[in-house]
């Protein structure tokens, strides 16, 4: 039996699925194969070697089950048909089964070389709550009895990044490994807590939590949103003069850069933060980097994910002004309306306070109004 996936991190749902499969099939050998780089992702929350180590902890004590480093040895993106070919090479006379959750079932027909997968292996499926899927045409499917925990690695990462409860979702030995290695934002949190003011760090966690909540409500990646929230103000480690030096040294693409550096260098912290997230903290996801870069000034044509962080930043629980609560409540049901209100609120605060209005702000307001002109 084969069980592939990112295991980023491995959790109790993975363990429960494996245990049920062992009871149903009693396979002689089972290989759990963490991806080096998933076909569906550009990066992972933890390095491949750590995910393999955690997977070994996940399967400890299960008869005939081992965590297999095949993908790590290849050192590149590997597709399921390649895993099956490797299993055929190793076990030419074996009856092969591939274990998946029902959330994966609906996607099988779109996998690379799906016709080869239809012919070459049988499929064992465990049903996750809310993820019932029809059998794709031509696949030999057997469904496991019962339902399995509603746990996902994406939600686990979101909780870790946002410093919310998470360890009950994983085995104690996996939780201990995550803590020892300071994975999934634990090291970032330590760094941010030491480099930001207490109030700024409180705000950082508030934005991370709200961004994750809004992502869940509106169909975005909650882990990516929580990570963007966690790092959105990392550029605030510098004072305005330090930000200006950083922008000049790195030649960051701040809109109206010379004017901004002269009039309000603090507005550049979002661009500094995006550069730090990429260079210092190893963030590769362009959606996360874009959201960090544009969470303060915004830009016409902002993606929905970028708008989500923009709204979370102005309306997190720590914000004391009355408009924040209104925007936050609005965001939970209509993100575009909340974005329009957030942009208008920022512009109004600057004008009423006699501050310098960045040339980007009216352009972003017009863009926001075009999204919901009613």
Image: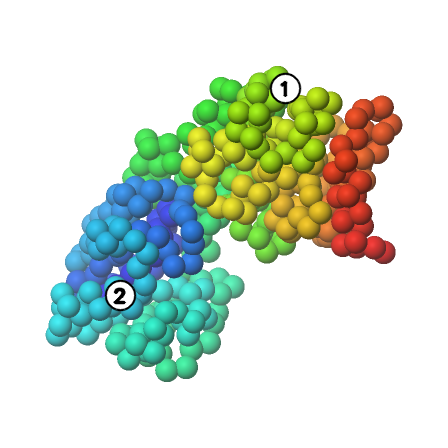
Quadrant in which residue 293 is drawn:
top right
Extreme residue toward the bottom, this view = 138
How does the figure colour the protein chain or chains?
Answer: rainbow
Q: Residue at x 46, y 24 (%)?
A: 191
Residue 268 location (% of width, % of height): 63, 29
Lateral position of residue 76 relative to residue 86, left or right: right
Residue 362 location (% of width, % of height): 80, 40
Query: Does label 1 or label 2 sit earlier along the sequence?
Result: 2
Marks 1 and 2, how far apart at CA: 52 Å
Lateral position of residue 244 relative to residue 44, left or right: right
Q: Residue at x 54, y 35 (%)?
A: 274
The answer to whether residue 298 is above or below residue 25 is above
Residue behind mark 1: 240
Discs 1/2, front: 1
Q: Which mark is residue 366?
A: none
Quadrant in which residue 356 is drawn:
top right
């Amino acid at each position: 039996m084969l069980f592939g996936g990112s295991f980023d991190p491995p959790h109790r749902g993975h363990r429960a699925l494996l245990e049920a499969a062992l009871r149903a099939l009693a396979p002689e050998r089972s290989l759990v194969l963490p991806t080096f780089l998933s076909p569906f992702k550009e990066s992972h929350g933890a390095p491949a070697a750590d995910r393999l180590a955690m997977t070994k902890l996940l399967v400890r004590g299960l008869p005939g089950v081992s965590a297999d480093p095949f993908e790590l040895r290849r050192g590149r993106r590997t597709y399921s048909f390649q895993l099956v070919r490797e299993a055929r090479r190793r076990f030419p006379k074996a009856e092969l089964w591939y274990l998946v959750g029902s959330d994966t079932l609906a996607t099988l027909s779109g996998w690379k070389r799906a016709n080869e997968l239809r012919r070459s292996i049988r499929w064992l499926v465990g049903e996750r709550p809310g993820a019932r899927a029809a059998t794709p045409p031509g696949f030999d499917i057997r469904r496991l009895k019962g339902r399995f925990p509603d746990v996902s690695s994406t939600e686990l990462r979101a909780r870790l990044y946002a410093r919310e409860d998470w360890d009950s979702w994983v085995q104690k030995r996996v939780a201990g490994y995550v803590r020892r290695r300071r994975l999934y934002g634990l090291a970032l949190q330590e760094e941010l807590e030491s480099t930001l003011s207490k109030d700024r760090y409180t705000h950082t966690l508030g934005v991370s939590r709200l961004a994750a909540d809004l992502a869940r409500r509106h169909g975005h990646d909650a882990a990516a949103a929580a990570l963007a929230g966690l790092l959105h103000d990392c550029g605030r480690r510098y004072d305005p003069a330090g930000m200006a030096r950083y922008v000049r040294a790195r030649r960051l693409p701040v809109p109206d850069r010379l004017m901004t550096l002269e009039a309000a260098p603090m507005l550049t912290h979002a661009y500094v933060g995006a550069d730090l997230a990429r260079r210092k903290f190893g963030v590769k996801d362009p959606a996360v980097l874009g959201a960090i870069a544009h969470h303060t000034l915004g830009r016409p044509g902002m993606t929905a994910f970028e708008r989500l962080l923009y709204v979370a930043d102005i309306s997190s629980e720590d914000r004391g002004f009355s408009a924040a609560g209104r925007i936050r409540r609005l965001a939970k049901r209509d993100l575009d309306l909340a974005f329009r209100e957030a942009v208008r609120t920022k512009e109004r605060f600057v004008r009423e306070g006699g501050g310098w209005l960045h040339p980007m702000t009216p352009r972003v307001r017009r863009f926001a109004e075009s999204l919901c002109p009613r």
